[in-house]
Amino acid sequence: MRKAGRGSSLHLVHHRLLHLSSDVELPQFEHRGAIDLSPPAQQQQQLAKTASSSPTFQPDSGSSAKIEEWINRWKDDPAYHNGEIFYQVALQRREEDKPETWDVQSVRLCHVPLSTSDSFVLHLTPSAKSVIDRQGRGDDGSKSESFDDRDSLVEWFSYYVDPVPRDGSCSPATLSKTTKKGKKQPQAPPLSNSTVEVRDVRYTPKVALRAPVPMTPTGEPIKPPPEKSFLQKYWMYIGAFLLVLAVAAPPEAEGGPDNGAGAGARRK
């Protein structure tokens, strides 16, 4: 089994079963494989040209047989179909880390037989991305970045299996429906296609707190002033508008008796 040193880019993966309805002592983890975030030296130049440095999962030789052994042992147990048996995966960052400090993710064991693939999503520390990128640039003869004096590159990780029932249940009818829905029972061993995805850590934004309600000395909330009506708000503008209309109105046409007399004189 490979070892993960302090600050190493190598992260070990372990697995076990968790039986919720059992009084048996919690079983210990068993080695499943390793994830190496730094590309091998012979691949550094190629990775630098292709801009692809996705890490891969390196399974242990007996891990697949162990998973099938667990499935065959518990698949007829009522707890299996009640969703009370979980398949757990743990990530060990450093060799000196104890099992109680490992990051653990769980999926229901009943979903594992239907799943030929699983995914490890590694959420990197803020400085890890640049370190890994520099590790792959070896074509210019520059010295590669060393991980010996750094802490772990992974902040936390997520684990998924695919496919799973839409409702997440473990009933025989649901599992059978999931198997028949466009997919036959997989011929490949469960979890035989493992992929690793690297993501930057995204912290939850800070919550913006609202201003407190103003209170009176007696502890009662101060009521806001009543809102003004439309006329109270805009009476000045309405008055100015009416005044402009009055000033700009055309004068009335002037007329009188002289105009009439003159017309009569011309008729004579």
Image (cartoon, rainbow, N blue to C red):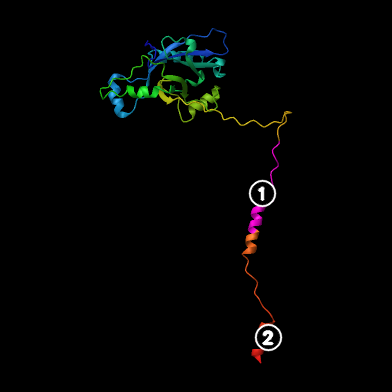
- For this orientation, the residue located farthest to the bottom is 268
- Residue 73's x, y, as percent? 49, 12
Mark pair 1, 2: CA separation: 56 Å
Kind of residue sitting beneath label 1:
Lys
Q: Which residues are magenta?
A: 223-241
Say whether disc 1 or disc 2 marks the residue closer to the N-terminus.
Answer: 1
Name the quadrant containing residue 209: top right
Q: Which residue is mark 2?
A: 261
Quick check: 120 above or below 100?
A: below
Kind of residue sitting beneath label 2:
Ala
Q: Which residue is mark 1?
A: 233
Quadrant of the image for the N terminus? Answer: top left
Residue drawn where x is 30% and y is 26% of the image: 48
Question: Magenta span has 170?
Answer: no
The answer to whether the residue labelled 1 contacts the one labelled 2, judged by CB atoms less than 8 Å apart, is no
- For this orientation, the residue located farthest to the top is 25
Q: Nearer the viewer, residue 104 or 19?
A: 104
Name the quadrant containing residue 251: bottom right
Give the structural element (helix, strand or loop) at label 1.
helix
